[in-house]
Amino acid sequence: MSRDQNNGWEVSTPGRICLLGEHQDYLGLPVIAAAIDLRLSLRALRPDPDRFILDMPDLGTYYVLENTGQRQAYQQERDYLRSAYNLMVDMGLSWEHGWHCQARGKIPINAGTSSSTALVLSWVAFLLAAAGHPKCADPGFVAELAHRAEVLEFGEPGGMMDHYSCSFGNLIHVDPAHPVPRRLTPDLGAFVLGDSGQPKDTRGVLGSVKQLALDAVAQITRVLPEFDLKTTSLHQVAPYLKTLPVRQQEVLTANLVDRDLLAQGFALLQQETLDHAQLGHLLTQHHHQLSQKKQISTPKIDRMLEAAIAAGALGGKINGSGGGGCMFAYAPNHSQAVAAAIREAGGRAFVIHVCPGLLIKQCKRFSSLVWCGHVPTK
């Protein structure tokens, strides 16, 4: 895309849900995830001589980054936007000037639906476009750069699921053994997303469960040297489980069960005619492992899911790292009744559908901008 100063950019990125494989991608196991039609939009509204200013009304704040053309020290604990800029500086990219930008969205914040990743992806695509990079609309390139900025740069425990699912969009099978996600095209109906209003603890829960899994794998390999998390069956492992501490037993068992549930789901979603009831059943089985064995759910989220199923949903699960955040239910026939049941159980409900991924377009500059506060001065 050109760097015509008469034009700006608009980047739209969806949130996501994980159908099967939750808490698996960071172990090198596949996941099945979907982009959802709750999206974030980032607009580059007008040039600024030497700063990037990002207004974020949904958070009641703004972000300022000086366009120095050099790597900058991080100014906060998880300074993802500056890390994206730094990585592009390392790539040799530069910007003739800064931009006034604004980001707004409908993705629940800090709720497990990848609002943070959607913002980082949008920011990465915009910075690439503003620098004239030819791959600013390449979903794989943008996803990998955003993953470096959000996860690898800060040594965080997450995998690539969020970045691939939000960038590629639709329903995808992400296998770390293959460089490109595989798109799945079943005739899916509506889901209902339920936000518990309980802030999730991504790093705490994700880091704890990941470490339990890694420790369990290391321990079981000492007594069963041929163990392979990708192929060894639960039946083969069962005689050796008692050599592990109880929590490691639970997490390793859940990983093996969830791995096999995903394999069933992958086959199901490729069938010519989708068995909607069986998909719902697999989701609920997956939730049981996440709630009872990995212990990442909450009583409120469990109640919301129970209410959704009682109202006609075919199944569902907690979504995201856990400890709070969202759940979703598969409700192709009773979405409004399910949404009402989730609200009655104390959650916010959104009827959602699978949707395309990251979209970027060049557009005429906007002449006005409504800020959440005063435009920052130097």
Image: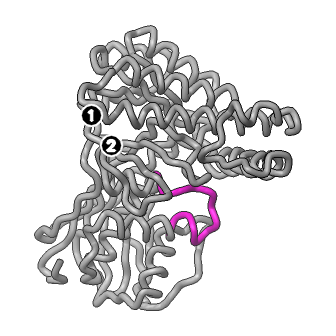
Give the magenta-colored segment's residue range: 149-161
Task: Give the SS element for disc 2.
Answer: strand
Residue 165 in view here: yes
The quadrant in which the N terminus is found is bottom left
Of 191 and 161, the residue lying toward us: 161
Task: Give the side of residue 52 with respect to residue 359, left or right.
Answer: right
Residue at (64%, 39%) from the top-left corner? Answer: 255
Indicate the colouring scheme: one colour
Report the residue marked by disc 1.
Answer: 186
Crowding at dot 1, Cα within 10 Å, few <14 / some 14-19 / many 20+, comes out as some
What separation in Å lies between label 1 and label 2 (alpha carbons)?
9 Å
Q: Are marks 1 and 2 in contact (CB under 8 Å)?
A: yes
Nearest the eye: 282 or 243: 243
Q: Give the quarter of the image for residue 360.
A: bottom left
Residue 160 falls within the magenta-colored stretch: yes
At label 1, the amino acid type is Pro
- Which amino acid type is marked by label 2? Leu
Name the spot of residue 335 as percent of width and height, x first. Answer: 31, 19
Q: Residues within 10 Å of mark 2 (few under 14, many from 20)?
A: many
Quarter of the figure with residue 61: bottom left
Q: Residue at image x 32%, y 69%?
A: 125
Q: Is residue 365 above or below residue 336?
A: below
Residue 210, percent from left and from top: 69, 49
Q: Is residue 378 visible?
A: no
At 29% from the left and 83% from the top, the residue drawn is 131
Residue for point 28% across, 34% down:
353
Queried whether the magenta region covers residue 5, the answer comes back as: no
Q: Residue furthest top?
A: 310
Classify residue 11 as left or right of residue 109: left
35 to 284, vertically: above or below: below
Residue 171's label in the rendered image is 2
